[in-house]
Image (tube, rainbow, N blue to C red):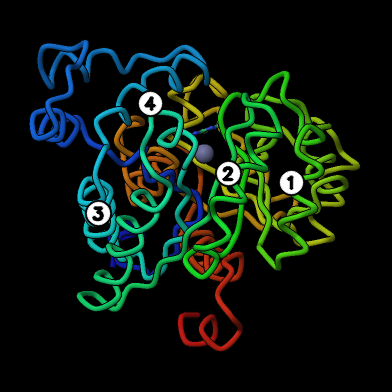
Amino acid sequence: ESLRNLLQKMPKAELHIHIEGSLEPELIFALAKRNGVALRYASVDELRRAYAFTDLQSFLDIYYAGASVLLHEQDFYDMTLAYLQRAHADNVRHAEIFFDPQTHTERGVAFSTVIDGIHRALDDAKRHWGMSGALIMCFLRHLPEEDALATLEQAIPHRAKFIGVGLDSSERGHPPEKFARVFARCKELGLHLVAHAGEEGPPDYIRSALDVLHVERIDHGVRCLEDAALTRRLAEQRVPLTVCPLSNIKLRVFDRLADHNLLKLLEAGLLVTVNSDDPAYFGGYVNDNFLRMFEALPLGREQARLLARNSFVASFLDEAAKRKLL
Ligand code: HPA
Ligand code: ZN
């Protein structure tokens, strides 16, 4: 069996996927038409051509514009089911999915519309394909902590529909400390905690995500290698990193896949996983991330099996469910 085959066929979990980042240009146009929303782009091709990013912020501007076509519960359902179907084709057995309620509630869409549409698709994926899914609600870090606290209040009646919270959007200038109070509240509520850190931001943001927010996983985290003591700590404490190779290239964290530090992260003994981040914007779903990373770096079957295993180990599945999938 070829390495390619192994990567495609191996059961895996995906732990870093923003559902709004799975919205393909074709679906953006279909929803714009269905909802009578005007777009700044004349065609699918023109929109795709705008996906030439120079950094995180240049991506986020287009990503929030794309999400503006989502108005009704069915829109959130259609987006989520399309992702789950595509992930199923990549043999994703379990997905922990980020959603950004503030992107929608700021436009006047009700919190329940967002979470009910997404959650109904998770139920259907379980029934259709036996695939499990769980939601992680992200706070937008460019907005004030008060907004995050208000979002958490809106989420409480829906507590059973999500398992954790995260932190995303513009990293630089918005350190984890800004969200200390809201994360403390979430911890009291028994929610799982994760945060984006060390993507564009410095290693210190990874340290404060651990020490101040008490997160269980770091999303991205690739800049940890700039700090040897931090790297040792992440390895010793088995803190998972949800790495997204194609995202890192598109957002210029690394120039080329051959320059990516994924192999160095593995060699440092870190619990690394491979994920797609925003597959509709970054040129590939999770198997594309595996295939292109394995073409670019000297990685083999042993690392393939390790990364697949890590994806389940790093997940928030309970131990019995993990044992079944490992
Ligand atoms: N980083 C920060 N915020 C995001 C990302 C990301 O990679 N994708 C969607 N929101
Ligand atoms: Zn992300």
The residue pinned by badge 1 equals 182
Where on the picture, by quarter, is residue 196?
top right
Q: Position of residue 302 (x, y in %)?
A: 52, 64
Q: CA distance from mark 3 to mark 4?
A: 18 Å
The residue indicated by pointer 3 is 77
Of tags 4 and 1, which is closer to the observer? 1
Asked if the residue at label 4 sits under 8 Å from ligand 1, the reply is yes
Amino acid marked by disc 3: Tyr
Contact between marks 3 and 4 (CB within 8 A): the answer is no
Residue 307: x, y in percent?
53, 60
- Looking at the image, residue 69 lies above or below residue 96: above
Labels 3 and 1: the sequence-earlier one = 3
Kindly identify which numbered label has been placed on residue 151: 2
Mark closer to the chain start, 2 or 1: 2
> What residue would you read off at disc 4?
63
Identify the residue shown where x is 28% and y is 58%. 84
How far is disc 2 from disc 1 in space, using C-alphas? 10 Å
At label 1, the amino acid type is: Val
Which element type, helix, strand or loop, lies under badge 1?
helix
* SS of the residue under disc 4: helix
Mark 3 neighbour density, 10 Å: few (under 14) some (14–19) many (20 or more) = many
Residue furthest to the right: 229
Q: Is residue 287 left or right of residue 206?
A: left
Assign a secondary structure to mark 2.
Answer: helix
* Residues under numbered marks 4 and 1 in contact, where contact means CB atoms less than 8 Å apart: no
Q: Nearer the viewer, mark 3 or mark 2?
A: 2
Choose between 226 and 83: the one closer to the eye.
83
Q: Amino acid at mark 2?
A: Thr
Alpha-carbon span between mark 3 and mark 2: 21 Å
